[in-house]
Amino acid sequence: MPTDPEISSQAAAAELKIDDLQGPLIRFSGNWESSGRLPAVDALVRQFPDRAAGELRFDSSAIAAWDSLFVTWILRLTEALQTRGIGVAYDGLPEGVQGLIALARAVPERKGARRISETEGWLTRIGRRVQGLLDDTRRLLAFLGEVSLAFARMLTGRARFRRSDLALFIQQTGVDALPIVSLISVLVGLILAFIGALQLALFGAQVYIANLVGIAMVREMGAMMAAIIMAGRTGAAFSAQLGTMQVNEEIDAFKTLGIDPVEFLVLPRLLALTLMMPLLCIYADLLGIVGGMLVGIGLFDISPTQYIEQTVSAVTLTDIGVGMVKSVVFGLLIALAGCMKGIQCGRSASAVGEAATSAVVAAIVAIVVSDAIMTLIANALGV
């Protein structure tokens, strides 16, 4: 690889000469290193006649310096010429360039190394979506079957999981969740009372703020807000925990030892969240009513006794029961979504993040859809 300082600063040049007897010849000159600007291959290829006699020859005696980019340039040129039926002789190139070209041609290009962007048709995209939906449905049904069998074994006393794990998950889904549930519930009660009071004040019926907040919190908002909080907090945590165990092959180790992962890992989480959600719902209902009371007492001169009496007269045991049933269903759906996404997680760090995200999304969608269905059923039954 020559490095003549007198001509190393010259720009790279490639001059084409056509000889009808000996064939085309390219003379190289200047600096052919990657730091310089190389001639365009396409422009040089266009100078070749449609039919050239003999093989293409090279004269590299005037090259100041070259590197691997020069080899790449030669390969691109020869590939373009060979498609036009023009042969190439590499004798006039430096020995190092000839060796690298021989090595490049000796090792074939790996299949699939080049990425070819192909636009799929709309029918193909629809087919892929439908196939993906069918696969997800099949995995969901299989997971629900495994959970049902594990729950049946628990009822018969044959399920294997540690009671200490159940106690730990009860603490995590219950006591540890109280601060965030408290904050959100009070704020929801404040918002409901303030918005309702603006309309009720037009009729001088501010006292019915208590009725509005009490019924809304007990039947809908208490269970709904607690469920959404637990979906983002606990559902994602369940998915990330089980997904990390999947990445570390801990779940495979359970299967090797003959321990059912659904029994040992999913069942205690499912029981803990399902048991704690009704208690969190009652707690959220009470704090939401307290938030509405703050607005009624502070802004609309309603006495605490009057507010409490209105709430007690408006809220019935049926309303409380509807909210409790919804909270149990929400807790079950959140735990199922989080554990299913974690168990079915891939084996990479990005897969754990995707599983946690999809668990939260699936849980929230399931909460909203199930709430709408249960509300329609309650209205149809007149409760």
Image (cartoon, rainbow, N blue to C red):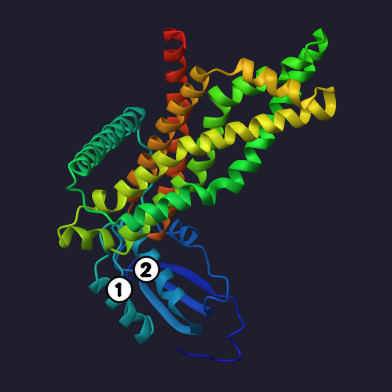
Q: Regarding mark 1 in the picture, which secondary structure is present there?
A: helix
Q: Earlier in the sequence, mark 1 or mark 2?
A: 2
Work out whether residue 374 or residue 42 is closer to the camera in this orientation and state it: 374
Q: In the rendered image of this protein, does residue 179 appear above or below residue 86? A: above
Q: Is residue 344 visible?
A: no
- The answer to which of 167 and 110 lies nearer the viewer is 167
**Near-viewer residue (145 or 318):** 318
Report helix, strand or loop for mark 2.
helix
Residue behind mark 1: 104
Specify the amino acid type for callout 1: Ala
Figure disc tally: 2
Could you tell me which residue is drawn at 53 percent across and 30 percent down? 224
Residue 162 position within the rendered picture, expressed as x and y whole percent measured from the top left: 29, 57
Residue in the image at 37% along x and 59% along y: 244
Quarter of the figure with residue 187: top right
Residue 42 is labelled as none
In the drawing, does residue 136 fall left or right of residue 58? left
Q: Is residue 156 found left or right of 31 in the rendered image?
A: left
CB within 8 Å, label 1 to label 2: yes
290 with respect to 206 (left or right): left
Q: Inspect this view and state whether residue 209 appears.
A: yes
Image coordinates for residue 343, horizontal then vertical, percent: 31, 50
The quarter of the rendered structure image containing the N terminus is: bottom left
Residue named by callout 2: 75
Mark 1 crowd level (few <14, some 14–19, many ≥20, 10 Å Cα) = some
Where is residue 291? Give x, y as percent. 70, 33
Give x and y (percent) for residue 70: 45, 75
